[in-house]
Each structure stands twice: as C-alpha cells, then as structure tokens.
C-alpha cells in the first residue's frame, strides 16, 4: 500500500496580489429540495431586479423560474402522495388484521368439521394430529458395581 503525503492547506493569491491568503470557506449552498427551490426563486428575483445590467440572462432566468414552478408543483404532488400512501397503509393494516382473524376462524372450522386427526386437513395446510410418540425410558448405564461387603451391609 502506498502511503499518501499530507497536502498543505490550500492557499490562493489574494486579489491585490500581495501574497498568499488561506482559502475562505465557500458560501454554503442549499442542499434540501425546498431550500434549492427557494434559492432559485431569490436568484431569479435578484437577476430580474438587475435586468438592465444583465439583459443577456433573461431567457435563462425565465427557464429557471419555469423549473422552480415545476419543482414546487412536484413537491406539492409528492406531499399529497405521501398522505395517500399513509392512508393506504392504514387501510392495508386493517384489511390484513381482519383477513388474519377470518383465516384463523376458517382453519378452526375446517378442523372442527373434519376432526383433528383427519388427513384431509393437509389439503388446507393444517397438520393433522397423529398422536404423540411414545417416550422411551432411558436405559441406565451400567455403573461400577459395589463390592459384595457393602451390598450386604446396606441390606442389613
């Protein structure tokens, strides 16, 4: 693996050319969708306010405003869909709970009708009761036998 050298801090020449100045942090840009849309709106308004100096940017400002409007509309749709999704999720939970209760009822009714030992239950994905396996008594392991003198003493 090749070791990387640590780079010195980035430096730029100052505007007056008097030497090196440390790089300033850039202006933070909006990162959220709504933040970007608001930033575009402010930018468009500022460019329009200075339209006498910037006539060549008029078509770009119009396009940015159209995209900003489209973004706002899509955000509204997204919120509406989120609300609909939450509503549909609640409806689905209700349907699943009711369906689970009904399926349990039907399984019990089928078991009651055919009997708990009927092989017909397998058609309904139910296990028929086939009895318990007989428990086998574990055979005691032969241990060391006690000497005869101790057996006689124990019996007396």
Image (cartoon, rainbow, N blue to C red):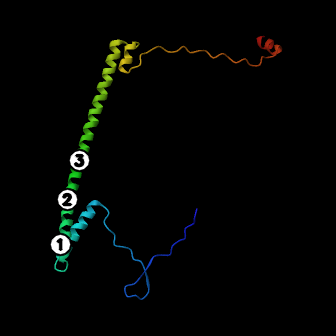
Residue beneath label 1, please?
A: 58
Considering the numbered disc 1 on the image, is that residue within a helix, a strand or a loop?
Answer: helix
Query: Is 57 located above or below residue 96 in the figure?
Result: below
**Mark drawn on residue 70:** 2
Residue beneath label 3, please?
A: 83
Q: Nearer the viewer, residue 118 or 1?
A: 1
- Rendered location of residue 46, percent (x, y): 20, 74
Mark 1 is surrounded, within 10 Å at the Cα level, by few (under 14), some (14 to 19) or many (20 or more) other residues, namely some
Q: Nearer the viewer, residue 71 or 90?
A: 71
Residue 27 occupies quadrant: bottom left
Considering the numbered disc 3 on the image, is that residue within a helix, a strand or a loop?
Answer: helix
Residue 91 occupies quadrant: top left
Query: Is 83 located above or below residue 34 in the figure?
Result: above
Mark 2 is surrounded, within 10 Å at the Cα level, by few (under 14), some (14 to 19) or many (20 or more) other residues, namely few
Answer with mark 2 or mark 1, whichever residue precedes in sequence: 1
Query: Is 112 located above or below residue 14 in the figure?
Result: above
Left or right: where 77 falls relative to 146: left
Residue visible at 20% across and 73% down in the picture: 57
- Rendered location of residue 105, percent (x, y): 31, 22
Measure how far apart labels 2 and 1 are at the Cα level: 18 Å
Measure how far apart labels 3 and 2 are at the Cα level: 20 Å
Residue 68 occupies quadrant: bottom left
Eye-nearest disc, 2 or 1 = 1
Eye-nearest disc, 3 or 2 = 2
Measure how far apart labels 1 and 3 are at the Cα level: 38 Å
Q: Marks 3 and 1: in contact by CB < 8 Å?
A: no
Left or right: where 45 falls relative to 107: left
Left or right: where 20 falls relative to 41: right
Considering the numbered disc 2 on the image, is that residue within a helix, a strand or a loop?
Answer: helix
**Mark drawn on residue 154:** none
């Amino acid at each position: 693996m090749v070791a990387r050298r640590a780079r010195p801090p980035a430096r730029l020449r100052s505007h007056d050319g008097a030497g090196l100045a440390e790089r300033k942090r850039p202006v933070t840009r909006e990162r959220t969708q709504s933040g970007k849309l608001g930033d575009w709106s402010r930018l468009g308004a500022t460019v329009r306010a200075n339209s006498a100096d910037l006539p060549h940017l008029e078509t770009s400002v119009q396009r940015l405003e159209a995209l900003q409007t489209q973004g706002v509309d899509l955000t509204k749709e997204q919120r509406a869909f989120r609300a609909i999704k939450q509503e549909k999720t609640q409806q689905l939970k209700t349907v699943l709970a009711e369906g689970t209760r009904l399926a349990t009822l039907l399984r019990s009714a089928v078991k009651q009708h055919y009997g708990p030992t009927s092989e017909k239950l397998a058609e309904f994905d139910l296990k028929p009761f086939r009895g318990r396996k007989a428990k086998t008594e574990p055979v005691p392991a032969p241990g060391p036998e006690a000497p005869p003198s101790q057996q006689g003493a124990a019996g007396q």
